[in-house]
Amino acid sequence: MAENDDWIVFDTADRSPENWLSLGDQVPLRGAVLEGDYGAGFMHWVRNDNKSEKPHALKCGIHRTDVDTAIHVDGSSGHEFTCIIEGTLTVELDDGRTFVLEPGMTAHFKPGHPGTYRYKAPFRQFVVVAYGQDTP
């Protein structure tokens, strides 16, 4: 990864262990693990603003897992955008709606919307979370 004041360039092939955060140890889960090992997943944040310090914080990075996993989340406090790179993500919202996302597909979820996220491994997605944004 190269960084200056204006640009951050990230090599998606970067598999250096020190650049990947274990989801089980370092990224708090907003819900409960239903199946599999959530701790087997990893996150590589390219940008990780602290939302308590910035009213319009932004986080983006690559999430990967090599283990089929299902988690129930209480809902995000920010707008989430995802682009599936590999594997399948099935989102089963508590309101009964289900979305199946496969490689090349993108999705935007507004804040809230609790539900179950099922990751079919091997899985990789690019994720952007924006906090403090008005909902159109």
Image (spheres, helix red, strand yellow):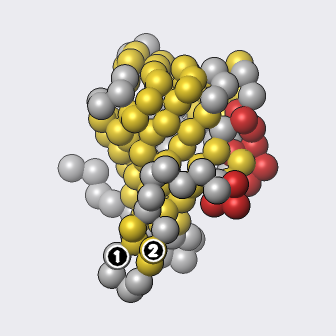
Residue 86's tag is none
Residue under label 1: 7
Measuring 44% from the left and 78% from the top, which residue is drawn there?
Answer: 3
| Rendering coords of residue 22 (x, y %) | 71, 48
Dot 2 lies on which element? strand
Measuring 63% from the left and 21% from the top, which residue is drawn there?
Answer: 68
Measuring 43% from the left and 62% from the top, which residue is drawn there?
Answer: 10
Check disc 2: other Cα within 10 Å, few if <14, some if 14-19, many if 20+: few
| 69 or 133, nearer to the observer | 69
Instruction: Tell me which amino acid carries mark 2.
Output: Ala
Dot 1 lies on which element? loop
The image quadrant of residue 116 is top right
Circles 2 and 1, Cβ within 8 Å, touching? The answer is yes
Residue at the outermost bottom position: 5
| 95 or 107, nearer to the observer | 107
| Rendering coords of residue 96 (x, y %) | 43, 14
| Rendering coords of residue 110 (x, y %) | 36, 42
Residue under label 2: 2
Measuring 69% from the left and 45% from the top, which residue is drawn there?
Answer: 23
Instruction: Tell me which amino acid carries mark 1.
Output: Trp
Residue at the outermost left position: 136
Q: Earlier in the sequence, mark 2 or mark 1?
A: 2
